Structure formats: structure tokens, C-alpha cells
Amino acid sequence: MSIQFGPDYVRAIAPYQGGKPISEVAREFGLDEAKIIKLASNENPLGMPESAKQAMVAAVAEAGRYPDGNGFELKAAITAKYGVPAEWITLGNGSNDILELAAHAFVQPGQSVIYAQYSFAIYALATQAVGGRSIVVDAKNYGHDLEAMAAAITEDTRLIFIANPNNPTGSFIPGQQIEAFLKRVPESVVVVLDEAYTEFLPKEMQYDSIAWVSRYPNLLVSRSMSKVYGLAGLRIGYGIAQAGITDLLNRIRQPFNVNSLAQAAAIAALQDDAFVQRSAKLNADGYRQLTAAFDSMGIEYVPSLGNFVLIKVGEDLGAGARINLALLKQGVIVRPVGNYGLPQWLRISIGLPQENETFIAALKKALA
Ligand SMILES: Cc1ncc(COP(=O)(O)O)c(C=O)c1O
């Protein structure tokens, strides 16, 4: 009998399935890389802002040295933007890092973690990696059912993950409902409010979660620089919470978890409001372009507040995989979501107008 390494709960982990890289699809399907479009990973179709590129280039000269492990300047930029003290900030290697740090810091094997059905895949992974017990609460209209999530809290619950907007469904919970939920959660339970897509929200839907951090010592707000800020490849995100939480996260993170180029780029990007506005507008326009096509084609979709849309491409359980393959053959990469229990659906990241157009044409062919 061969030796089995590691605990059962680690061996039980199903690997994360990311979007296929362009180079891989080119190789697999014999396609020209330049003609492939990728609408699979909720990236910013504009790429990174010029301001961030320049900051990064300037920082290259010092890349032979270790980065500032405390991220002094980046934290100062976050403080300037959101008015939170540096002691409330944890920098992460992507906001993914913040989510995992929370599981490591607050959950022991056997203790429970609550998150919603059809919510971000990393919540399950992070929970399993520490031997936590997942309580997956049924979704309501493809979004979070906060009533049911509050009712699911048990004696041993240590952590709750909420994504707002949610990936992969794009569903959104209005701010008042989240605050009402926070009031009901016992102080011993840490709530991670994952706001990776928050910058895409239209003005009238924005809410002030940073103000809640002052009121709720058990709230950890997580933000990403990968989405609207276009820095996905650099891996950078941050958490905001009172010192009681932040101090622990900072003790267990790798001392140099955010590299110096990423820090430089993030400082510039955070100050580039014009880029954020341009990106959010491009996304809103792209959403209208895609959903108008879905409406005219009679395709069901979940209304989304993120930079992606979940669409139903057939009734049979093989539909998602089949249409995905037909799209790949045409050089269009989107995201199958069978691993989320949504085998009839595909998630489409919103691209440039021309990319959206190419996708729509490819989808029509794939469905024909
Ligand atoms: C809801 C949600 N949270 C967090 C992340 C992690 O993003 P990153 O680690 O690139 O900041 C993603 C990425 O897709 C996401 O969809």
C-alpha cells in the first residue's frame, strides 16, 4: 500500500479550476494566439493603467532588494483614499491571500465556516485547507440568502464569507441588508465581506462598508486590485479590519507576500480615478451590449453587478461543457461553471466592445 501524505481534509480538496490561458488554448486547438479572446477570468479588458505601468517600470531598478514587508507607502495610499489607519490594513498576494489568511487565522479543524451556494470557489478551498467544516447555505435567486445564513450559525462557527457582488452569479446584496446581517452575527464570528468587484457598482448602489469596520470589530472587508484596477497578474489585494483581526492576519502572512512591483503599481492605480471611471463605464456599456444580445436570442441570464454575466446555454446537464468546447474551437475562452453546480451555465467576463461582438457571433454559431 502506498503512503498517503497529509490529513484527509487536504487530500479531499478538489483543485481550483481557473480560466484557460490563451497560450494553452492556442496549442490545444491549433489556433493563432493573436486571434483568441479571453473572457474567462473577470480581468479588466483595458489591461493595467498606464500610470501603474510607469510606476512599475520605475520600481524595476530596485527589484533586486526585498520589498517593504510592511507596505508602508501602499498603506499610506489606502489610508489617504479610505481614511483607515495603517493598523487596520493587511496586504495580500491577491485578495485570495486575504481570504486564505482569514481561514488560517480563525478556523481550527472541525470548526464551521458559512458561505452561500454558488459563491466564490476559494471559500470552500480555504475552509478545507484548514480542516474546517463547510456550511453551504442554499442560494436564493442565485444570490445570498442572508436570513438563512444567519440561521445557519452554530456554536462552532468561526467565519462567514460573503461576496458582494458575488462571483460567479453577479448577484448583489443592498448595503442595508448587509448591515442588518452584521448586527445579528455574534462578535466571536468573523465576517469576511469580499468586495472584489465593488468598484463596478453604480453610484446609487454603493455603500460604506469601511464605516462598518469601525462599528463591527468582527468585520473584515476584502478588496482586490485585480478587477477594476487591472493588476490581476501582479497579485495584490488588501483587507481592512480593526486591529484585533488585522494583527493576527499580519502575524501569519508571509513577511514579503506582496512584491515590490505590485506595491508600486497599486499605489499608482489607487490614485488613478480616471482609469477606474473609464473601466467602470466600459463595463456598464459592455453589460448592456451583451444582455441586449442575450435578450434578443432568448438566453436566460442572472442580472449582474460584476464585470461578468452568468448565462444558461441549454437545459441538459452537458450544455455548459458542450457550448464551452464549441466556443473554444472558435478561439473564445469563457468559464464553464459545472464545478459550482451550474452545468447548464457559462460565465462570460465583459470584454471590449469588439470582443463582446466576437463572443456573441461565436455563441450564435455554437448554439446553432
Ligand atoms: C469574489 C472574488 N473574490 C476574490 C477574488 C480573488 O481575486 P484576487 O486574488 O485576484 O484579488 C475573486 C477573483 O476572481 C473573486 O471573484
Image (cartoon, grey):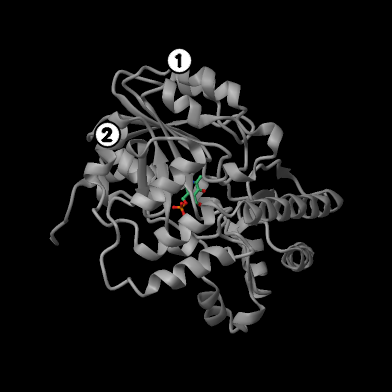
Residue 250, quarter of the rendered image: top left
Q: Residues within 10 Å of mark 1 (few under 14, many from 20)?
A: few
Q: Kindly tell me whether residue 313 is visible in this rendering.
A: no
Residue 184: image tag: 1
Between 174 and 87, the residue placed more toward the observer is 87
Would you say the residues marked 2 and 1 are in contact, meaning their CB atoms lie under 8 Å apart?
A: no
* Quadrant in the rendering for residue 293: bottom right
Q: Earlier in the sequence, mark 2 or mark 1?
A: 2
152 w.r.t. 307: above or below = above
| Residue located 30% across and 31% down the image | 243
Local secondary structure at mark 1: helix
Seen in the picture, residue 169 relative to 363 is either above or below; the reply is above
Residue bearing the label numbered 2: 107
Above or below, comparing residue 171 to residue 20 in the picture: above
Going by the image, does 272 lie left or right of 303?
left
Q: Amino acid at mark 1?
A: Arg
